[in-house]
Amino acid sequence: MYICNNCGAILENTVSIHEYHNELDDKPIEKYHGCPFCKCDDVMEAVQCDLCGEFVAYDYVKLKDGTIACSDCYETF
């Protein structure tokens, strides 16, 4: 799973995005993977909190038993 840092969408997969630059003489095509909703390339892999089910990209802790806890759940754990 992935999470878009721009619009917050939770994505199963990123999509290939082609951006055409017709304003330049050689009309290059910029290709990248990103969010299908906002077309942003600021997308990170996400993990699901085992306690609340929320998907998070970086605010989580993996406990000794393998449980993944988001920062909110870890504070109340």
Image (tube, rainbow, N blue to C red):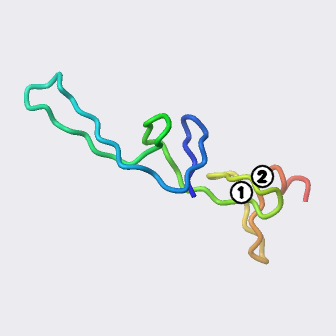
Nearest to N terminus: mark 1 or mark 2: 1
Residue, far top: 23
Q: Which residue is mark 1?
A: 60
Q: Where in the figure is residue 24, as x and y percent of width and height?
A: 14, 25
How far from the left and from the top, in percent, is residue 62? Answer: 72, 67
Q: Which residue is mark 2?
A: 71
The N terminus: image quadrant: bottom right
Q: What element does badge 2 sit on?
A: helix
Q: Determine whether, in the image, residue 27 is placed left or right of residue 14.
A: left
Name the kind of residue labelled 2 in the image.
Ser
Residue at 87% x, 53% y is 75
Furthest residue to the right?
Answer: 76
Question: x, y percentage for residue 11?
Answer: 56, 51
Task: Name the secondary structure under disc 1.
Answer: strand
Q: Nearer the viewer, residue 77 or 5?
A: 5
**Disc assigned to residue 36:** none
Q: Is residue 29 left or right of residue 47?
A: left
